[in-house]
Amino acid sequence: MLTKEELLEKAKKPSQEAMKLHPFYQGKIEITPKCCIRSMDDFSIWYSPGVAEPCKAINKNKDLSFDYTNRANLIAVISDGTRVLGLGNIGPEAAMPVMEGKAMIFKYLGGVDAIPLCLDTTDPKKFIETVKLLEPSFGGINLEDIEMPKCFEILDTLRKEMNIPVWHDDQQGTALVTVAGFINALKVVGKKIDRVKIAMVGAGSANICTARMLIKAGVNPENIIMTDTKGTLHKGRTELQEKYKEKWEICQKTNKNNVLGGIAEAMKGADALVALSTPGPDIIKKEWIKAMAKDSIVFVCANPIPEIWPWEAKEAGARIVATGRSDFPNQVNNSLGFPGVFRGALDVRAKTITDEMCIAAANEIAKVQEDIGLDDEHIVPTMDNWEVYIREAVAVGLKAIEQGVARKILTKEELRANAEKVIKRSRDEVKFLMEKGIIKMPE
């Protein structure tokens, strides 16, 4: 068992290594050909003059762009750099390492080709217009690290006006993985989803979307109390009505007893805490956890440091503790969600990603871990379990077909075979490049 000092040192290591290895590799992704190049003569096929024929075919039928180009497996990871991790508005250039990392994870875990794009505008209308103009080149859009409230407008508008999936990972991705972990945590402690009382700390896009998805999954909205920097959300917070309509929606649906105060009041007697707020530690106090119900569930998912260190939450009486970090048990991390969701959406050429597709993904993530075994420190699969991405892709693809938003109809067996093949190829490619020294190992 590590001491507190050793745990703190361990927690610092990823940041220290990142500063060594980012300049070592000068980025995390590159573009390589996927077609054969037997000789220079092949360029007459892949480029002029041969390329004119697929161009003419696509001109007659635009949907052929999914068959004749990489569009069917290509997405854009797009940000304006206004809310990056726990760092805030650091700008588009400083956001690029995160978007590259996202693209790398998409490829390795989901077999999805992703291009990082950071836009030099904070104007939501310009952002929306730019993304819409990119539609012919991509099969999907992953929005990332955009401040609220404009992130809601951007997502809602693009989902309505584009014919490819548009997803905001800070909203839908965070929500579905949180719901997956929450479903299994309840099974471990033996509590019913429609009866638990939940304190939600932070009223940003992630927690608002998480609240919506928890409600869709069966949580009684009256049993939720959410807090922002000014205290609990309740029907008396009329100042939110105009500027923050999403927060006002939460005020209307939740906090049945109109509890006033701050985080301490919201957490008192709660069965569960879902914190997606300010990087910690010491945002959540030990005494607040002590005041929760028996067998409490504590999700403290701020990045890069959780709102309270997991060992302190345990000392205060929490039964299950989850964070967003891989160096602690129960990593409730978006990376469990977005690679599999997009794999499934792209494989059926979905026009959108619905809330029901997200719930299907959450349920499948939960089932994967349940099949392995549930306990206090294992409520969701780890990222090295590649089966979760395959099963998630199948669940999402089938739900898209069921809802009529798929362009391509595949059987469950076909979806599974395709996801397995594409994801295995991506992993094998990285392994091969490392073995051959093309990807150099750190010194």
Image (cartoon, rainbow, N blue to C red):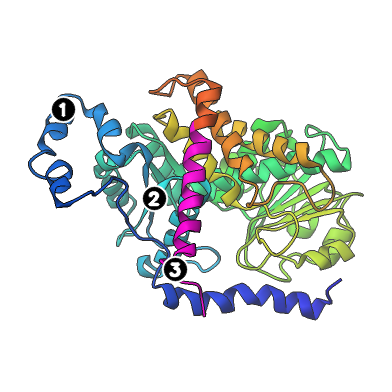
Q: In the rendered view, does 225 fall on the left or right side of 276?
A: right
Q: Which residue is mark 2?
A: 114
Question: Quick one: label 1, few (<14), some, or many (20+) residues within 10 Å?
Answer: some
First along the sequence among labels 3 and 2:
2
Return the disc, 1 or 2, that comes first in the chain's sequence: 1
Q: Which residues are magenta?
A: 418-443
Number of disc labels: 3
Ranked by sequence position, the earlier of labels 3 and 1 is 1
User: In the rendered image of this protein, does residue 410 appear above or below residue 130?
Assistant: above
Rendering quarter of residue 222:
top right
Q: Which residue shows up at 53% across the image and 63% down it?
A: 85
Label 2 sits on a secondary structure element that is strand
Name the residue nearer the viewer: 123 or 386. 386
In 3D space, how far apart are the residues under numbered discs 3 and 2 (Cα atoms)? 24 Å
x and y percent of residue 240 in the render? 54, 49
Main secondary-structure element of the magenta-colored stretch: helix
Judging by the rendered image, the residue that carries numbered circle 3 is 437
Residue at mark 1: 57
Asked if the residue at tag 1 contacts the one at tag 3, i.e. Cβ–Cβ closer than 8 Å, the answer is no
Q: CA distance from mark 1 to mark 2?
A: 25 Å
Foreground: disc 3 or disc 1: 3
| Dot in front, 3 or 2 | 3
Nearer to us in this view, 96 or 221: 96
Q: Report x, y in % for residue 260.
A: 74, 52
Instruction: Give the SS element for disc 3.
Output: loop
- Secondary structure beneath disc 1? helix
